[in-house]
Amino acid sequence: MVVWKGFAIEVISSRDGHRIRALATGVALNRGLPHPTVSPRGIVYFDQGVAPPVGIPFEQIRSVPLLGGPATVVANGRDPTISPNGSLLAYVTDSSPEAIAVLDLDTGATKRWASSSVGPDITQLSWSTDSRFLAFTAVIPSSDRRTESLGNWALDVTAASGSLGTASRIRLPLCPIPDLWAPYGASRAMAWVGYLSPHEGIGACQQFGPSPQSGRIQLDLVDPTDGRLVARLPSLRGELGVANAFAGTESTVSIDASGRYLAVGEAGTGTGALYRWSIGQPRTAVAARPVLVTRGAFAASWVG
């Protein structure tokens, strides 16, 4: 796996967390935490905060070979996500209002889809297995800023640049009714995590507790084409940062290329913990618990 750990982008063993090599050091963002992504072509893309001598700090997307080497600036933005075919790099632009950009790494052409309002807080970019659709989650505040609504959409990247309003809604089941520990205005909307196959994916709910350490993460197998719940995975302790409504973006769920393994990072236990989880086949027979890989590592991305 490639992870962000100790302000560095590192390659680690997915079995025991042993560090294989550091690819970049002193890596941090102005908001949230860096999110590395690994290309099938052996390139790692990550986001890095930049503080110019004069002006407003911003984020850059940088690339570095998986085997090590100098980092190269690719674009301005955050949350890079490489497509399964390795040809397209998606990221959230460093602009207001936010936009999603998709860079064709073969031609250098970039498409952009902009939000119609300021502050939707786009996060959790994830590709469909055929590299055609880009899913994302957005937390949209109400007009009085007292509550938030969480939504999940899929953008057809073969279409021309335009508005994010052209994206189609991903239908997901509702999360359980929030308990008394949930913050005011907590949504029952499930957050989309990523595709396992064209008709299977992972959705997430946060079950709040009196403290971050007592919260629970509920991951579900769902069919994004009809919103059907396929199977419910065992819950995990902690907090999952898939969107602002879930207490920040300090942790993520990463799905490997085969659609059989999850890397789950949670941020509710103080130092954070990274788990490896095999969901196997059939999906409805999931019973094994996640295996702890290491602590203090966030935003894992699978290699291969």
Image (cartoon, grey):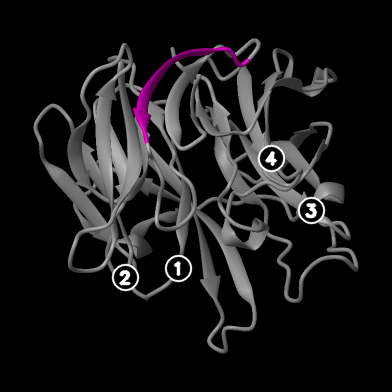
Residue 225 visible in the shown view:
no
User: Label 4, on which residue?
Assistant: 271
User: Label 3, on which residue?
Assistant: 212
**Percent x, y for residue 283?**
73, 21
Residue drawn at x 29%, y 23% as measured from the top left: 86
Residue drawn at x 25%, y 30% as measured from the top left: 63
Residue 3 visible in the shown view:
yes
Q: Residues under labels 3 and 1: Cα distance?
A: 25 Å
**Given contact means CB atoms under 8 Å apart, are the residues at marks 2 and 4 in contact?**
no
User: Label 1, on which residue?
Assistant: 120
Within the image, what quadrant is residue 146 found in? bottom right
Q: Residues under labels 3 and 2: Cα distance?
A: 31 Å
Amino acid type at image mark 2: Pro
Left or right position of 75 against 233: left
Nearer-N-terminus badge (3/2): 2
Within the image, what quadrant is residue 276 found in? top right
**Percent x, y for residue 12?**
52, 16
Amino acid type at image mark 3: Pro
**Percent x, y for residue 88?**
26, 32
Amino acid type at image mark 4: Thr
Nearer-N-terminus badge (4/1): 1
Nearer-N-terminus badge (3/1): 1
Q: In the rendered image of this protein, does residue 124 appear above or below residue 202?
A: below
**Given contact means CB atoms under 8 Å apart, are the residues at marks 2 and 1 in contact?**
yes
Q: Nearer the viewer, residue 221 or 277?
A: 277
Q: Nearer the viewer, residue 36 or 93?
A: 36
Nearer-N-terminus badge (2/4): 2
Residue 18 lies in the magenta-colored region? yes
